[in-house]
Image (tube, helix red, strand yellow):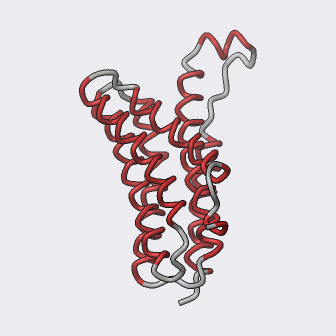
Amino acid sequence: MSKNPLFRAMDVVVWVTVFYLARQLPHPYPFAWEGFVGGYAPKQLGYYLISMLWVAGLWFALYRARDRAEAVDHRAVLAGMTLMFLVIMTPYATGLLLSSKSRFVYRFFGGTAVLTALAAYGLLWALEANRGAFGSDRRKLLVALSIIAAGLGISLIRHRQLAVLAVSLAGLWLFVAPFVGPKADER
């Protein structure tokens, strides 16, 4: 089946989510440096920027593989739909971070990121049956998944904010990953 409807829907969901997260960015009151530093705006700004970095980094990391795919099958459609659902859950998890201080909320945020990375890995796995040249992209996504899983594992024991930090590091890695190592076309 044609790849265009699935990937266009994924693009729309990702960028609507990023736009929604951008609209939630705080506006300090008063609109001055004192209002920004004095309120809880830096914390809120940080959480929303980390979520935007994660979602946009995931889209950026998957873009090359999606562009090279020729067609999709039912597995790729299912993985893409799961990925879209989990991307839509990211603003909800971010909003929970701001409204609660419980350890469960930080674990929920990290767990949502782990599930999103697994869905993206599943999408690459489903696309590989058609083309067979996405091994380097899957390895780079596994590095991001291991960063999040390590941060989430440590946050289960201590330092609950480490789950959020791990998501931000994984998002940065996904932006840098396409420029690191050999390209799949050069093998």
Q: Residue at x 51, y 53 (%)?
A: 140
Between 43 and 126, the residue placed more toward the observer is: 126
Residue sticking out furthest to the bottom: 1
- Please provide percent x and percent y for residue 79: 42, 70
Q: Quadrant of residue 67?
A: bottom right
Q: Residue at x 59, y 43 (%)?
A: 52
- Please provide percent x and percent y for residue 152: 33, 36
- Please provide percent x and percent y for residue 103: 29, 28
Q: Quadrant of residue 117?
A: bottom left
Residue sticking out furthest to the front: 187
**In which quadrant is the C terminus drawn?**
bottom right
Answer above or below: position of 154 versus 23. above
Residue sticking out furthest to the left: 157
Answer above or below: position of 90 versus 79. above
Answer above or below: position of 118 versus 23. below
- Please provide percent x and percent y for residue 33: 73, 13
Q: Is residue 114 left or right of residue 140?
A: left
Between 86 and 119, the residue placed more toward the observer is: 119
Q: Residue at x 55, y 76 (%)?
A: 6
